[in-house]
Image (tube, helix red, strand yellow):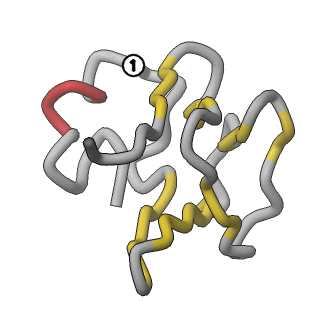
Amino acid sequence: VLGRAHGDAANLLAKHANVSQRHAEVDVHDGEVWVTDLRSTNGTYIDGRRLEPFEPTHLQPGVELRLAADVSLHLERPR
């Protein structure tokens, strides 16, 4: 779970007040990465498109995953 209060990234995200405490969940199934917005206040976005809450969405390598307005993450294939 990504957010200000949960997960490994909580310390990094704590300074971003527009990121919800439980913002989004990232899962890996059979080598594929999926992200689910957890009904965050300010949204979870893939390449600028806001995700619907609680609908897992496949993350392709090279896309931008954004939490709220100012936290961007990029998925890359392992080398």
Q: Residue at x 24, y 55 (%)?
A: 6
Write down the quadrant of residue 57 in the picture: bottom right
Compared to 22, does 14 lie above or below?
Answer: above
Write down the quadrant of residue 41 in the picture: top right
Compared to 6, does 68 lie above or below?
Answer: above
Which residue is most to the bottom? 30
Which residue matches tag 1? 16
Relative image position of residue 76 (x, y in whole percent): 42, 38
Relative image position of residue 25 (x, y in whole percent): 45, 64
Compared to 15, does 35 lie above or below?
Answer: below
Front residue of this view, candidates 19 and 67: 67
Q: How many residues crowd around disc 1 within 10 Å: few (fewer than 14), some, or many (20 or more)?
A: some
Front residue of this view, candidates 5 and 59: 59
* SS label for mark 1: loop
Q: Residue at x 20, y 25 (%)?
A: 12
- Report the number of discs: 1
Q: Residue at x 41, y 72 (%)?
A: 27
Quadrant of the frame with the C terminus: top left
Relative image position of residue 53 (x, y in whole percent): 74, 65
